Image (spheres, grey):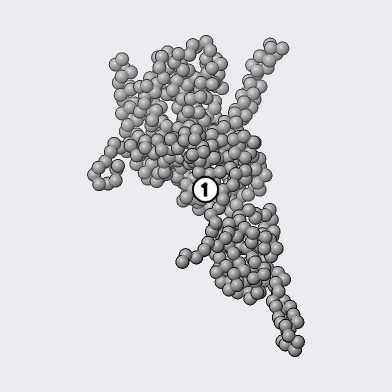
Amino acid sequence: MANGNGSRTLLGMGMVKGLFVTITTMFKTIFLPKKHLATVNYPKVKETPAPRARGVIALDQEACTVCMLCARQCPDWCIYIEGHKEEQPPSKPGGRIKVRATLDRFDIDYALCMYCGICVEVCPFDALFWTPEYEYSETQMGEMLHDMDRLQDWMKTVPEVPALEP
Amino acid sequence: MTTFVTELFSNFWVSLAAKLALVAMMIPLIGMVIGFAEMKLSAKMQSRIGPYFAGGRWGWAQLIADGVKFFQKEDLIPEDADRPVFKSAPLLVLVGTVALFVVIPFGPGLIFRDLSVGIFYALAISSISTIGVLMAGWSSANKYSLMGGLRAAGQLIAYELPLVLAVVGSVIMAGTLSMSGIVEAQIAAGYPFVILQVVGFAIFMIAALAELTRIPFDMPIAESELVMGYLTEYSGFRFLFFFLAEFANMFTMSAIAATLFLGGYWLPGIPESVLEFAGPVILIGKVFILSFVMIWFRWTFPRFREDQLQTLAWKWLIPIALANIVITAVLKVLL
């Protein structure tokens, strides 16, 4: 190795070694693709992403309380939330009426989202989750604004949370 | 009927048009074959699949799809660009490529025009594309383009002299400058000149790589430094012209190297009677082998710096090439 410590080999041996590496890799990939291929034929063959891959953000509508913390923390303001209060009858006659915050709109503009995950971090009620889903490309920029039903759909792809270590 | 055809083709303009049409068909075809080979081989060298979708099997139609895509693109010209120069630069590069086909012998008598100064003409014409590159860099009104164009011009100073000097050894051995004359001299000698001109062949190939601005000498493009060098502002079919010229130039430089050093359309042991038909196949086979070596180098070596290329050319290649000429000339006189 010509590593500068005096132990030098013939001039140009490094280049020959490099050529050898590329040509052997080429023949290995051509003749033994199963063993040496590092990529897959994507739309036909799919790799399973790592369970904690940050593919897209899913929303659990039941858990959301319209507190707006995520929308306010979002660095590029790509979350749109609208909600209203629904009054419910008191549990006992003469009691105070119950108020429940209901979600009307929860859109994330994935054309703007930079996948920082602050909304997931900040959510106090565990309504937002990372999922490894990644196939949600669109042909138009405007269609990247995904609504809450789509976000709810992605809840199915959220992996099981592993048990805490004792 | 046959007499009519021969009479028709004996007319200078008709035969010129036919030859031009042949070259005009060959350049995109060769560009696509070598370009596709580069895509696939580079993928295999990096443990990837490479193109596989277009055209069904192996993605063979990838470059056709790319070509169609280039035609659909908007033809952008920067506002501050020098429009006539900007527009004519890709044409000039392609003209340099087309003109090189004139002197390549594909077989005995299968040559567009057997110039008596063939190799001299080829070396002169191959430098024209550098002017096109310099024009492209200058007219784009873009600092990256300008840097790329000037680097191409600087590179010319480095590789042009070794390229010419490397050829001289072969010319001395053949005793002629005509390209088909050099092949005939190799047939008469019974061996390809590379056997005695290994040094000349190596220097020619290194200088040819620099001429083609391919890695390890792709400083004028240098994606990691200059965006895309002199090509930065080009889009659509003008970019396609540069792209085709690059791969067609690979073919012509390999063909010249094969003619000068590897026996051109001739292989030892092939009877001369079949060369008429086997010649083009043999030459194209040799060209593909040399092109493969260029692709192999490209995906193995890192890029040189411009000053390192100058050092390599002036301190190593030129003295070695000169020594090669002296030794060849002395041996030619003595033996």
Left or right: A140 with respect to B37?
Answer: right
Q: What element carries label 1?
A: loop
**Badge 1: residue crowd in 10 Å (few <14, some 14–19, many ≥20):** some
The residue that mark 1 highlights is B228
Residue beneath the point at 66% across and 14% down: B6
Q: Which of A77 and A65 is in front in this view?
A: A65
Residue beneath the point at 25% across and 42% down: A7
Q: Is residue B256 above or below residue A145?
A: above
Quarter of the picture holding the C terminus of chain B: top left
Does residue B296 appear anywhere in the picture? no
Does residue B224 appear anywhere in the picture? yes
Look at label 1 and name its amino acid.
Answer: Met
Q: In this view, does B106 lie above or below A72?
A: above
Left or right: B53 with respect to B221?
Answer: right
Quarter of the picture holding the N terminus of chain B: top right
Rendering coords of residue B62 (x, y %): 61, 38
Residue beneath the point at 38% across and 32% down: B203
